[in-house]
């Protein structure tokens, strides 16, 4: 299991990019932290979730 934003999900073996796409996130408007480290956007496709990972996905929202 991988903990994403406080929820345990069975996404081990899936890439960050695949997860974000399937969850409906806009890749240009998010930041991803994996086990306390920011994942560079250029590495989303090659960064694979492993059981026990703790992930935080933060969406940026514009306002005025």
Image (spheres, rainbow, N blue to C red):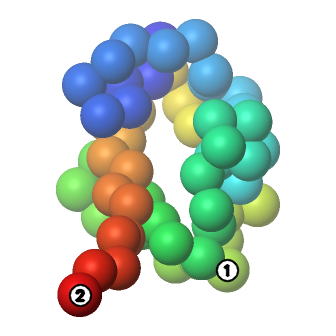
Does the residue at mark 2 contact the one at mark 1 (Cβ under 8 Å)?
no
Near mark 2 (Cα within 10 A), the count class, few <14, some 14-19 or many ≥20, is: few
Q: Can you tell which mark lies on residue 64? A: 2
Residue 9 falls left or right of residue 11: left
x%, y% of residue 4? 38, 31
Residue at 30 percent of width and 64 percent of height = 37
Residue 26 falls left or right of residue 3: right
Count of marks placed on residues: 2
Can you tell which quarter of the image residue 42 is in?
A: bottom right
Relative to 61, residue 7 above or below: above
Near mark 1 (Cα within 10 A), the count class, few <14, some 14-19 or many ≥20, is: few
x%, y% of residue 2? 45, 23
Q: Nearer the viewer, residue 40 or 62?
A: 62
How far is the residue under mark 2 from the one under mark 1?
A: 29 Å
Residue 2 falls left or right of residue 54: right
Residue at 39 percent of width and 51 percent of height = 57
Depth check, mark 2 against mark 1: the one in front is 2
- Quadrant where the C terminus is found in the figure: bottom left
Can you tell which quarter of the image residue 22 is in?
A: top right
Residue found at the very far front of the displayed protein: 64
Q: Can you tell which mark lies on residue 42? A: 1
Residue found at the very far bottom of the displayed protein: 64
Residue at 34 percent of width and 58 percent of height = 58
Residue at 33 percent of width and 18 percent of height = 7
Can you tell which quarter of the image residue 24 is in?
A: top right
Relative to 29, residue 50 above or below: above
Residue 1 falls left or right of residue 55: right
x%, y% of residue 13? 71, 29
């Amino acid at each position: 299991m991988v903990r994403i934003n406080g929820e345990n999900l069975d996404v081990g073996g899936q890439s960050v990019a695949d997860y974000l796409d399937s969850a409906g996130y806009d890749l240009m408007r998010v930041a991803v932290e994996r086990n306390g480290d920011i994942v560079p956007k250029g590495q989303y496709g090659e960064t694979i979730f492993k059981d026990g990972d703790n992930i935080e996905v933060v969406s940026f929202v514009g306002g005025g």
